[in-house]
Amino acid sequence: MEREARREQVLRHAKRIFARKGYHRTNVSDIIGRARIARGTFYLYFQNKRDLFEELLASVLLELTRRIQRLRIGPDQPDPVEQLRGNLRRVLGLVLAEPELTDILLNHTMGFDRELDRQVTDFYEKVIDQIQRSLDLGVEMKLVRPCETRIAACCILGGIKEVVLQASRSRRTDIEDLAEEILNFGLRGVAQPELIATMGNREGKAVYFLAQN
């Protein structure tokens, strides 16, 4: 237990240094100095700083997987929208509770280390895979309109990444409000419902575009 606690201590301090200095400007000396351990102790747990960084990526992906639950349909199940809302709340709760890790993932500078770049890219690809699977299931259950779910998944991830970045920078903690706004945007976009209904026919579209020009 003592060994595991010391290992977690190293990971915790490394996250803070990576967030402050960036991965490429951080070295093992920074980490062992902050964690107050000997260099030999560091190498008992990790081969190098990349090995440590990869473990951070793996741990956050695992935690995201746990928090994004598969939608369930049935008379004894919660409303699907409420299930989506719950997924958003849990994900936002994780990323806002881990500002250092969030900062590392959102601000990682590409182009200095090809292998590390691949690791970060793979991380986001796995997140997109999870979102796409949820969308595919939603289409199958007729909860999501037919669409190119891969593209939609990329749009969703991109939007959430920017929301999280802004929320992290401003230290926002109102997870309920953030989750509600993201959900509303995903379900309804930004147009007024009556405008969407009007644009459902060619005449309505013509009136709309004439009014704009």
Image (spheres, helix red, strand yellow):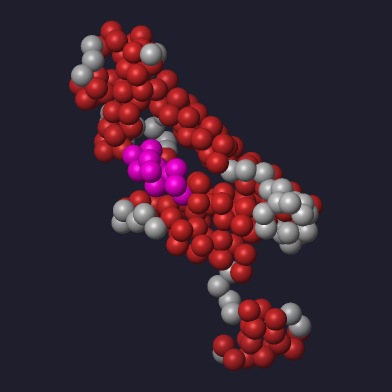
The picture places residue 192, in percent across and down from the top left corner, at 59, 79
The residue lying at 74 percent from left, 80 percent from top is: 200
Along the viewing direction, whichever of 51 and 114 lies nearer the viewer: 51
Whether residue 191 is in magenta: the answer is no
How many numbered discs?
A: 0
Among the 4 quarters of the image, the one containing residue 52: top left
The residue lying at 39 percent from left, 47 percent from top is: 96
Relative to residue 166, is residue 126 depicted above or below? above
The picture places residue 173, in percent across and down from the top left corner, at 36, 54
Among the 4 quarters of the image, the one containing residue 54: top left
Q: Is residue 136 visible?
A: no
> In the image, 128: left or right of 91?
right
The residue lying at 51 percent from left, 62 percent from top is: 180
The picture places residue 172, in percent across and down from the top left corner, at 35, 56
Q: Is residue 115 visible?
A: yes
Along the viewing direction, whichever of 210 and 173 lies nearer the viewer: 173
Q: Quadrant of the C terminus?
A: bottom right
Relative to residue 72, is residue 208 depicted above or below? below
Q: Quadrant of the N terminus?
A: top left
**Boundaries of the magenta span:** 92-102
The residue lying at 69 percent from left, 85 percent from top is: 198
